[in-house]
Amino acid sequence: MFQKLAIPDVILVTPKRHGDARGFFSETYRAEAFEEAGIPGPFIQDNHAYSQQPGVLRGLHFQKPPHAQAKLVRCTQGAIYDVAVDIRQGSPTYGRYVGAELSAENGAQLYVPEGFAHGYLTLTPDCHVQYKTSAYYAPETEGGLAWDDPELGIEWPMEGLDIILSDKDKILPPLSALAPVF
């Protein structure tokens, strides 16, 4: 099932699960079905991130053209709150965000197109997050936004969590300091 969110370019994907006494089977990616739903390919790199503690916040990250990335994100163990922020200059939803809970239990995935900053917060211990990207990692094109920028107003589900950030993520700028990228 493909559901366009409040920013319609961001799509929540909930693959069908076929279960029985052994567990379940789910087709998590099929190029033709994704293309029909407005999610173009190809994806050319797969990444896997592990976070030991709840409260790990990774983001908000993006890559600038010519290495801009679309992402297809899923949580294969634990649960995360996943966020996409529109940073496309001139977009009617510029500076707005959408978020969704992705978990091993719900099997949901979030498609984040190029032109969005992306980040997530771990809600449980021992989270495994896997995601596909449409471009290779190119550190010279990395950019980011402050996760707690009041202008973005992201409502992270932080109750009872101590936020854990990388040193790099602690110094990311607010949206107002971002030069036009997309």
Image: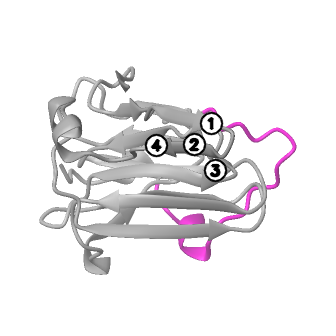
Label 2 sits on residue: 24
24 sits left or right of 181 in the view: right
The residue tagged with tag 3: helix, strand or loop?
Answer: strand
Do residues under tags 2 and 1 come within 8 Å of each other at their CB atoms? yes
Q: Tell me the magenta residue range.
A: 155-173
Q: What's the residue at 20%, 54% (across, down)?
A: 181
Residue under label 4: 26
Q: What is the three-letter code of the residue carrying label 1? A: Asp
In terms of secondary structure, where does tag 4 sit?
Answer: strand
Question: Closer to the camera, 94 or 79?
Answer: 79
Of mark 2 and mark 3, the one earlier in the sequence is 2
Mark 1 and mark 4 residues within 8 Å of each other at the beta carbon: no
87 shown above or below 77: above
Give me the residue at 39% from left, 44% from top.
27
The residue that mark 3 highlights is 121
Kind of residue at disc 3: Leu
Of the residues shown, which amino acid type is indicated by label 2?
Phe
Left or right of residue 112, residue 54 in this image: right
Q: Position of residue 4 (x, y in %)?
A: 33, 23
Q: Residues within 10 Å of mark 1 (few under 14, many from 20)?
A: few
Look at the numbered discs 4 and 3 and tell me whether their residues touch, using CB distance below 8 Å.
no
- x, y percent for residue 33: 22, 35
In reply to whether residue 166 is colored magenta, the answer given is: yes
Residue type, numbered disc 4: Ser
- Tell me how far mark 4 sits from mark 2, CA to CA: 7 Å
Q: Mark 1 points at which residue?
A: 20
